[in-house]
Image: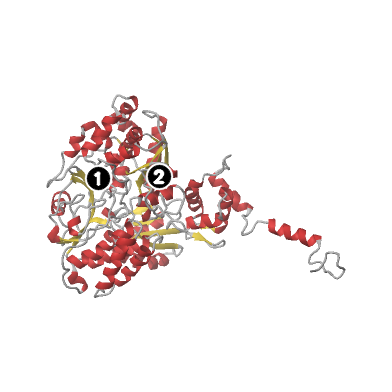
Amino acid sequence: MTSRNDPAAVPVATADDLRERIRRKAHLKGRQPEPQALADVQALIGPRPPEGHARDLLIEHLHLINDRHGALHERHLVALARLMNLPMAEVYEVASFYHHFEILRDGEQPARLVLRVCDSLSCQMAGAGELLAQLPGRLRALGHGDVRVQAVPCVGRCEQAPVAVVHQCPVPHATAERVLAQVDSMPERALALHPQAPAATVFDVAPESAITRGGEGVAPAWVGLAAYRAQGGYRLAADVAQGRVPRDAVLAAMEDSGLRGLGGAGFPAGRKWRIVREQAAPRLMAVNIDEGEPGTFKDRTYLERDPHRFLEGLLVAALVVGTDACYVYLRDEYHGCRAILRQALAELRADSPCALPHIELRRGAGAYICGEESAMIESIEGKRGEPRMRPPYIAQVGLFGRPTLEHNFETLYWVRDIVQHGPQWFAGFGRHGRRGLRSFSVSGRVKEPGVKLAPAGITLRELVDEYCGGMAEGHELYAYLPGGASGGILPARLADVPLDFDTLQPHGCFIGSAAVIVLGRKDRARDAALNVMRFFAHESCGQCTPCRVGTDKAARLMQAPVWDGDTLDDLALVMADASICGLGQAAPNPIRCMHKYFAHEVGEGPWPGDLPPPRGGVRTERIPPAGPGEATP
């Protein structure tokens, strides 16, 4: 051992060297924000509050940057991470999760415009493939080579198929000529915005009627606060707040009406209110308007015409359940609805019928998985939209760790009518032994697609003949999807099965959000099945292997002229049994329906026996188990 006094000892570093080492270690690692980028981002998100920028606003801040600069440049992500005091990796992993955020390296420029063409089933049947093939070349020929054409999943306008969207402006019943004309008239992002909707005096929702017939344009008139109040609007909310209508009476009306969740899960609404109300305060509410199931557009149809009826239902639910704050999660594709809802909320705050809870409008960013209740809550909290494992259940430990009442838009939309008309008003509708009303989003090979407010339990044949004007010219019914991409595919011989919760499960399908897509004999069920499986593969969040790998592998196998039935059956079993959420669990439904009902299209023999019970889609809800003496629906 060498002594420190040993004259032969050689120092390994001088004092200056040691000071330099300390200085280097104290220096921040990684890329540092540029002053101009910091100024750019701060101008958008505002000065730092005393408590710091809220972590749950990360996605909102990313939208501000993306809208202003056309993309998310790396320098702005670094600056945002610094201003929000977050790791750069955390900001990047959130930004890269959502389809509507484009991350660019510094120096790269975004496209002048992004032209999105929906390639989901209804639009594919209406000619989206031809549009996607024609548009790039024709745009270049007209000097629009800096306009990027992008195939995207369902944009929620299936009754107007095929649909293109020039930045934020929809082009219904799109042809190449109409799209090119729109690009000429809206040459940059600042001009390519959703048209402003005019005011209306009344929106009459007549039960058992065709709400829309497919040709109403993209900005229908909507009912503002004054017109809504003139029709008795917000009287119920005021009465509940003042105690003139007891809160327990409202809860009893909801339970007696039989109203079930209309986002797809179908859980009894009144029972959900009671479960959440029994939890410890503070309680929150989260409203799901991430209407991403292909074929579904009912929520948009009601919201862009009658937003205050929904807001009154939200207020009544908040009063009865006792929620302190409400978060409304709206899909990013609904730019017109977002403007309307912002204006309606501003009207309500300026002239409220009662004390309002804290209400925030949150913007999705292009992720179908956020229709799943826990994934939506993760997204509201500013995170990647990945489903949570349960338990704990959302009703017990939900948004920000608090008990949370999660509802679909349409469920709240009917609250005022049910309470004011009485529960038997709603329960009095129905056919074939079923109760209530259902809003069917109908698209495909029918004369008059659109939203049809029909009695629960109506059959597909009755729905098409009575509400849609029959099949489209030159088409004969061959098959139909009763519940969007997740709900399976049924043949024409089962067109007389009642459409409602629990009626389709014996046939391997479910109604979900009541998104009905009708196929004619010129269509092939295998093409529909492949389209929806590609959609699942595109929209899988990637969190669990059975879904991430299974949907991609299944989509590739389903392209073969003759299916490898054994391998697809194995994939279906693993996806259904081992996926974390309803996306992977429902992905096998189209495979199994093809085996059972359309085996001739894929070179197979008839399926022996019954299909396994279908698993719920992405909107499946999980509620705490019933306590002793309680019935489980």
The tag on residue 632 is 1
Q: Which numbered marker is on residue 396?
A: none
Element class at badge 2:
loop
Chosen colour scheme: secondary structure
Kindly report the distance in space between the C-alpha atoms of the residues bearing marks 2 and 1.
20 Å
Q: Nearer the viewer, residue 297 or 552?
A: 552
- Can residue 298 be seen here? The reply is yes
So how many labels did they put on this image? 2
Which circle's residue, 2 or 1, is located before the other in the chain? Answer: 2
Q: Residues within 10 Å of mark 1 (few under 14, many from 20)?
A: few
Name the residue at the front extreme. 1
Instruction: Label 1: state its secondary structure.
Output: loop
Identified at 33% across, 58% down, the residue is: 583
Amino acid identity at mark 2: Val
* Residue 529 drawn at (x, y percent): 26, 65
Measuring from the top left, give residue 419's x and y in whole percent: 25, 33
Residue at the far right in the pictured view: 7
**Residue 119, visible in the rendered structure:** no
Rendered residue at 63%/52% (across/down): 35
Q: Quadrant of the N terminus?
A: bottom right
Q: Where is residue 284 drawn, in percent x and y?
A: 40, 39
Question: Residue 604 at what x, y percent from top left?
Answer: 19, 73
Whether residue 220 sits left or right of residue 596 in the image: it is right
Quarter of the image for residue 415 reads top left
Between 101 and 410, the one lying in front of the other is 410
**Which amino acid type is marked by label 1?**
Thr
Using the image, tell me which numbered label, if any, was put on residue 397: 2
Mark 2 is surrounded, within 10 Å at the Cα level, by few (under 14), some (14 to 19) or many (20 or more) other residues, namely some
Direction from residue 539 to residue 431 in the image, left or right: left
Q: Is residue 413 above or below residue 120?
A: above
Residue drawn at x 14%, y 49% is 466
